[in-house]
Amino acid sequence: MDFILKDGFVFSGGEFFQSDVVISGDLILKVGKVKKGEFPGFEKIDCSGKLVLPSFTDSHLHLEAFADSLGEVDLRNAKTLEEALYLVSEFRKAIPSGDWITGGRWDKNLWKEPCFPKASDLDPVTGDHPAALWSKDGHALWLNSLAMSALKISRETPDPPGGKILREDDGTPSGILLENACDLYGGKLSNLKEEGEPDLKKAVRYLQKQGVSGCNWILERDWDPLSFISYLDSQNLDFDCTLWFPRESIEAVIKSGLKSGDGTDRVKLGGIKLFADGALGSQTALLLSPYEGSTSCGIEVTPKSELEKIVSLLAEKEIGVSIHAIGDLAVRNAIQAFYPKRDVNMKLRSRIEHVQLIHPDDLAPFFKSGLMASVQPIHAVSDRKMAIALWGERVKFSYPYRSLHSAGIHLAFGSDAPVEEPSPLKGIYAACLRQTPFVEEEPFLPEEALDLKDALEAYTYWGAWGTFQEKNKGRIAPGIKGDLVVLSENLGKKPLKALGKTEVFLLLYRGKIVRV
C-alpha cells in the first residue's frame, strides 16, 4: 500500500523538521512537502504535527525469555518476600498439579529485609510443584526443595567455576544459585519440564505496541546458527532480529561459516555473547574495590585472559563479540580484552553490554577500542537505591550516559527485557530526566542526563547500526525502508515531561501498518 504521512514533525539524522513523508511499497519515496495533486491514489494519514521518527530498535533483549515471561509468574513488583510468596501461591492455583512454577524476576533489594530468599520460604507455598524463579537481573536462581532434588543439587554438589551455590551453615544448599551455577542448572530445566515453543509472535506484538521493529536478541540456548536463522526468517514476524549466541555456540558459529552481519534481510548474525561478571543486585558485579560494608568484590565469571583469547579467535573469523560487564573492573577487563582488535571492532559491531559502573580512566581506552556501549537507561532509575547503597561514593561514575557520549562512544539503547519492561519511551525518559515517570523523586545523577536528540538517536540510528540494519532503517530518507513510528506527542516542541504520557500512535514496518 502507498501512504503519505501528512504534516508530521520529523526526527531524523539528529534533527527535527516539519515534513510530509511519502511511502511506496516498502520504501520511503520522498521526504518533503507534498503538493496538491501529487502522488494521486496514495492514502493520506494526517499526523497533525505528531512526531514521526525511525522505528525503535531494542539493542538488548532476551526474546525467548520475554515470550516465556508473558505466561509465567511475575514477581517484579513484589515489595516484600511475603508479597512474592503470595503471588507464587496464587499462580500455583491456576496450573495443573505437579507442573513447574517458573518465571520470577524478584528483586530482594526492594524488600524490607534485602536478604536472599531460601527454599524453606518457597516450599510451603509451592506444594507438589517444583519451582525455579529467576531474580530480576537474571544472575540468581531461587529453587524450592523439589526443584533442587530434580536437578540433583545436594550438600555434596560442588560450586561450578564462575558460580556459587549458597549454603546453610551445615553445607546444605539454601535454594539460591549464583552466576554460572544458574546457567548450569537453569539450562537443565528444559530437560525436566514440558516446554512448548515460545510464542514469539505474541512477544513481537507486544514490542510493536511499544514502537519497536527490531532487536539484538541475546540467546540463552545453543541453537544451530544456520538452522535457527532460517527458521526465524520463515516465521515472517514483521520484525528484525540480530542474534548473539551463547559461549557454548562458538564452535557451531565458526563451523557455520557465517560472519557478523550475514544472514537474511530480516535475521542476521551478531556474534557471540560472553560474561565478564555478574550483576549489581546479586552483588556479583566485579569491582575494583569491595562493595560497601563488605569484603567482596563480586565474581569474575570469565577471566580477562580468556576473554581476550576468545575475542581474538572470533575476530580472525570476522565474528563480533558482546561482553556483559557491569562492575568497573569487569568493564576495564572487557576493554582490555577488546583493545588488541581495535581495528576491526567497529566493523564487527563488537560491544560492551550494560556498562553500569566505569572508572573515568577507562573512557578514553573504551573510545579507542572502537566499541559500542549497549546500555539500558531504565536500569539507572530502577537500580538507583541499591547502586547508592552498594557502591557508595563511586556511584557518581555509574550509568554514565553523558560521559560515554561525550567521550565519542556510540550508545545504543535497549531494555534487557524481561528484566525490565521493553518500553523505549520509558527508557528515553530515564536517559533524559534520570527519573521514573509519575514518581516524585530527585533526578539521579542529572549531570549524566542526555539531550532528547541523542537519546532518540540511541534508540533509532545507533540501534539500527548495531544490528547491521543502518542501510535499511534508522533514518527517514528516500530509499530507506518504511520503518517508522508516529508518537502521540510532539516531543520536539514539548517539555520532556510529556514523555510520561506519550504513546505510540502508529508503527510501520517495511511500509506496512503493523500497529495502530
Image (cartoon, rainbow, N blue to C red):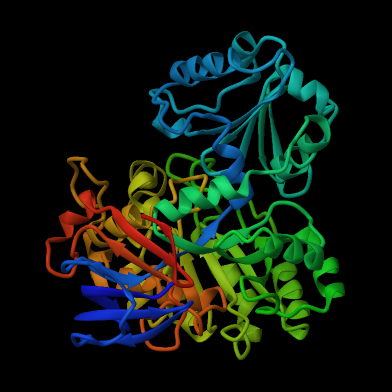
Q: Nearer the viewer, residue 504 or 252?
A: 504
Q: Which quadrant, please, contains the N terminus? A: bottom left
Compared with residue 178, is residue 265 higher up or lower down, i.e. above or below?
Answer: below
Residue 490 is left or right of residue 127, and the answer is: left
Q: Nearer the viewer, residue 355 or 431?
A: 431
Picture residue at 49% right of the left edge, 62% below the top: 328
Compared with residue 287, is residue 158 higher up or lower down, i.e. above or below?
Answer: above
Picture residue at 68% right of the left edge, 78% below the top: 260
User: Where in the figure is residue 122, as x and y percent of width and height?
Assistant: 61, 16
Picture residue at 75% right of the left edge, 66% below the top: 230
User: Where in the figure is residue 93, as x and y percent of width and height?
Assistant: 58, 12
Picture residue at 55% right of the left edge, 13% below the top: 89
Q: Based on the displayed image, in which of its 4 quarters is residue 396 positioned?
A: bottom left
User: Where in the figure is residue 164, as x and y percent of width and height?
Assistant: 70, 39
Q: Which quadrant, please, contains the C terminus? A: bottom left
User: Where in the figure is residue 312, as x and y percent of width and height?
Assistant: 74, 80
Q: Nearer the viewer, residue 317 or 362?
A: 317
Residue 128 is left or right of residue 504, and the answer is: right
